[in-house]
Image (spheres, grey):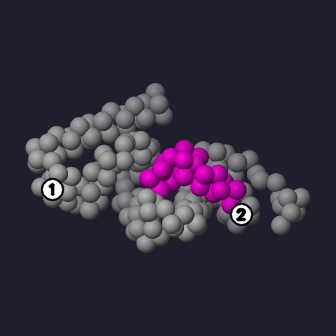
Amino acid sequence: MKTEDMNPPDEAFIRQLTDWQNRLFGYLVTILGNVHDAHDVLQETNVVMWRKMDEFEPGSNFGAWAKRCAQFQALAFLRDKKRDRHVFDEETLARLIEEDAQLVDSASGDEEQEIALRECLASLPDEQRRLIRDRYRDQLSVRELAGRIGKKESATKMALMRIRESLLVCIEGKLKEVNP
């Protein structure tokens, strides 16, 4: 489709697209695990959403539609980068996306807090993010975590406590930015 054949976007679409940039970026960082890859995939997601803006029904859930577009772009990105062993495979990504959808469905409705948590998790160093995922997503015990990382249980408990504290400070800071 040529650009001149497309209808110009309405103001509401542009506002929603703009409003969702940070949330989509945080979402992509969470599922891809890399800020640079998330930035690239976000750009491609924006292009796709722009091309498909006529498929979006005004009044429906823009965020769900945008996240679905981002999911497909992330899957395409991973397919193209399949040889890189540090990137999640499609099956792992599909599982993370499903878990994310379940978390969103069961969330208390505090979207700002959820977004802040995602952004703060994404900003953690890889080792800390893995520790949190293993503990809470995979529900490993502290003993299992300690064995996996080769540290004492007490040191592992302390590391988890410090990570949770830093997440709390980060989340509170982000929420203050949104609601001064």
Residue 61 appears in the rendering: no
Q: Where residue 2 appears, x then y in whole percent?
A: 86, 63
Residue at 33 percent of width and 33 percent of height? 169
User: For the residue labelled by badge 2, is the local secondary structure a helix, a strand or a loop?
Assistant: loop
Dot 1 and dot 2 residues touching (CB under 8 Å)? no
Q: What residue do we see at 64% from left, 51% from top?
A: 43
Q: Quadrant of residue 93?
A: bottom left
* Boundaries of the magenta span: 21-48
Q: Nearer the viewer, residue 7 or 23?
A: 23
Q: Which amino acid does label 1 sit on?
A: Gly
Residues packed near mark 2 inside 10 Å, few (<14), some (14 to 19) or many (20 plus): few
Q: Nearer the viewer, residue 171 or 147?
A: 147
Q: Can residue 63 be seen in this view?
A: yes
Q: Is residue 75 left or right of residue 10?
A: left
Q: Position of residue 53 (x, y in %)?
A: 72, 60
Q: Mark 2 points at which residue?
A: 52
Quarter of the image where one finds residue 52? bottom right
Q: Residue at x 42, y 46 (%)?
A: 122
In 3D space, how far apart are the residues under numbered discs 1 and 2 (Cα atoms)?
48 Å
145 left or right of 133 in image = left
Amino acid on which disc 2 is placed: Lys
Disc ID at residue 147: 1
Mark 1 neighbour density, 10 Å: few (under 14) some (14–19) many (20 or more): few
